[in-house]
Image (tube, grey):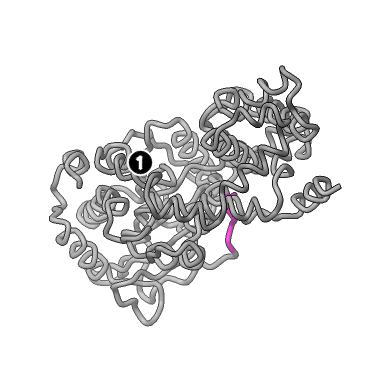
Amino acid sequence: MIAANCVVKAQDCGNDFLGTKTLYKQLAKTRTASPAGYVPVFINHVGRHGARHLTKTVESTLAYRLLLKADSTGQLSADGARLKQMVLNLQKAENGNTKSISAEGKSELEGIGERMAENYANIFAVGSEVEVRITKEARTKQSADAFLSGLNKRLSAPISADAENDDTNLRFYDLSPAYKKFENDVDDSELKISFNKQLRLDEIDNAVASRIFKSDFLAQLNAPQKEKLVSDLFGFACIVYSLQNEVAQAGLSMQDVDIKSLFTCDQLNTLGILDSADEYLKKGPGVDNNGIQVRVAVPLLVDFINSTDEYIKSGKYGAKLRFAHAETIAPFAALLQIGGAYKTSKNIKRITKVWQASRVIPLSSNIQWVLYKRKKGAGDYMVKIIFNEKAVRVSGIVSVKNASWYHWRDLRALCMRKLAKLNVNLTDDMAAYLKNLQ
């Protein structure tokens, strides 16, 4: 009876636990009029890929292997047998599309593209050109295609552009040996271990494993196996929100993949907090906003500055559109000191107040600099910084008339001061910067 009550409770838990797998929400229209006497002329954009499938196959996970092994020896509980079938259902819905965006992801990106065309129609007038940059991952190319499809729905003259790989500026976190070491060190850090202890992760691991397996099989599992099991299952529980169309196409209902029902609401909430804290430490401001996990995004900042300068010089492209990953957006937002994305904390109870993965890096999250030019006269530009389609302010610079507008010269000066502190020049080789980053 207790287990049944937990299942019913879990069904009504909401989705605050989803973190980086939170579906992108179109905000209420918040577009503001252009500054008096100015017109938008150029957009610098970077966005995360859309809602996606799993990044590794179901059958490659420890959870899948343990469930099948326990089942083969009659060591699954009733909940375990139900879970095994749901995991097999998820595998069916995945249908070999690992690492690809889902139908939901395609819809997210198309919507963002449509709204960009609606809001800045003059930028995409007849004859306009755009640059498109992606990473080595197929889901970024798929996201770019979906975005351009949405953009072109609202344009009288469709725009086409060949997407080019730009891992140095967009997948910088993979190209820095020092950052990769930092990332691994976080997992074994006293702070991360302290977070797990404070929120009693081991109790959740034991409770979930006990719910799934009978005692003989349970006795064979060590603590790391239980932790990985729960991590896999939590990942499954989160990913199904991105696969609603694929679940239906597989002839299933969402109840057939309701893996979250194996957790209580408190367990889901705790796992969500710990998952978000992990992202915060590794990709966000963490305990040091000048740490390597933020400085690793310098190549993207240099690219934003250089491409804006190039537009002002040549006026060739109306937009530079980049499609990347959560690991791209989070440190860039912290580097720019965007409100809600750059404050540090060592207190896990405080982290959720200053930084939330679901708000900073949901699926399809994005950052834009929209450049405005004075209609009359020359050499005067203003910038609006947009974060997930909402105009935002940044710390360290004075906005114009208390609005989210900045003179380009002021924003550029702020960015250049940041780079100067890091001994970085706009002409530096960014691949070398990443290789030598400490």
- Residue at the farthest right position: 1
Q: Is residue 315 at all visible to an observer of this figure?
A: no
| Rendered image quadrant of residue 199 | bottom right
Region in magenta: 22-27
Verify whether residue 24 appears in magenta.
yes
Q: With respect to residue 315, does 90 lie above or below?
A: above
Verify whether residue 121 appears in magenta.
no
Q: Main secondary structure of the magenta part?
A: loop
Q: With respect to residue 269, does 129 lie above or below?
A: above
Residue 140 screen position, x and y as percent? 44, 37
Q: In the image, 225: left or right of 340?
A: right
Residue 342 screen position, x and y as percent? 37, 63
Amino acid at circle 1: Asn
- Residue at the farthest top position: 72
Q: Is residue 408 at all visible to an observer of this figure?
A: yes
Q: Give the camera-side residue of 31 and 54.
A: 54
Q: In the image, 130: left or right of 377?
A: right
- Residue at the farthest bottom position: 401
